[in-house]
Image (cartoon, grey):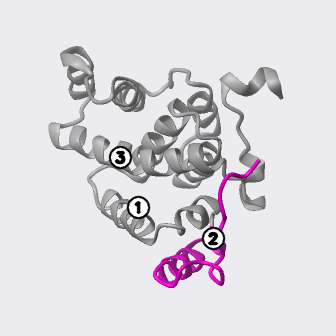
Amino acid sequence: MNKSTIHSIDTAPEAAKPFLEKVQGKFGFVPNILGAMAEAPATLEGYLTLTGIFEKSSLSPIERQLILLAVSRENECHFCVAAHSGGAIKAGLDDGEVEHLREGEALNDPKLEALHAFATALTVSRGHVGDKSLEAFLNAGYTRQQAYEVILGVAVKVMTNYVDALADVPLNDQLAPMKWVPPSRRAAE
C-alpha cells in the first residue's frame, strides 16, 4: 500500500514544480520516487543537485550506475533497483552483469567487481569499510578521489532508497520491465 502522495507536476507544491518539469523533460515522465520526494521541495532539489554533481565525477557512466544499483540492492529499494538496472544497461553494462548486480553476485570484470564490493561495503558498514576494503579498491586501479566519489554516489542513493522505504513507491509503467523483488520479500510473492 502506498504510504505517501505521488505528486505530478500539477499537484506538486509550487517550489517542486520546476524540478519535476526538468525531470519530465529529461526522462519523458516523472519517476514516482521523485513525485513522492516532491512533497519536500528542498529534498527534491537536494537530490537533483547531488545527482548532477555525481554525474560530474571522474567515474564513468557505467561505474556510476553500478554504484547506484549496488547501493539500492543492498538497501532493498525495489524502485531504484528497477530504475538503475535500466540505467546500467543504457550506460553500456552487459545484461548479465546487471543481473549479477541485481542478485548481489560477483561481477566478471575484476575492476568493476572491486567497485561493486567497495560500494556495497560502504553501504553495509555505514562507511566503516576498513583498510582491506579500501586497499582492494585502490589496488584495482581506482584512486582515493574516486573512493570519495563513491561516497557521494552512496549518499545520492540513500536519499531515494529511504524515500522508497518510507513511501513504498509504486513502479512507473516505464520501469515495470525491470521489476525487482528484494530477497527478503521473495517468499511472500
What element does badge 1 sit on? helix
Residues at marks 2 and 1 touching, judged by CB atoms closer than 8 Å: no
Specify whether residue 179 is painted magenta.
Answer: no
What element does badge 2 sit on? loop
Image mark for residue 30: 2
Residue at point 55%, 82% (across, down): 21
* Range covered by the magenta-colored residues: 1-30
Image mark for residue 47: 1
- Image height check: is 174 above or below 167? below
- Of labels 2 and 1, earlier in sequence is 2
Rate crowding at label 3 as few (under 14), some (14 to 19) or many (20 or more) other CA atoms within 10 Å. some
Q: Amino acid at mark 2?
A: Val
The answer to which of 15 and 81 lies nearer the viewer is 15
Relative horizontal placement of residue 167, taking residue 163 as reference (left or right): right
Q: Amino acid at mark 1?
A: Tyr
Q: Examine the image and state in which quarter residue 131 appears.
A: top left
Residue at point 64%, 48% (across, down): 79
Mark 3 sits on what residue? 155
Q: Magenta stretch: dominant SS?
A: loop
Relative horizontal placement of residue 14, taking residue 1 as reference (left or right): left
Q: Position of residue 64 (x, y in %)?
A: 41, 48
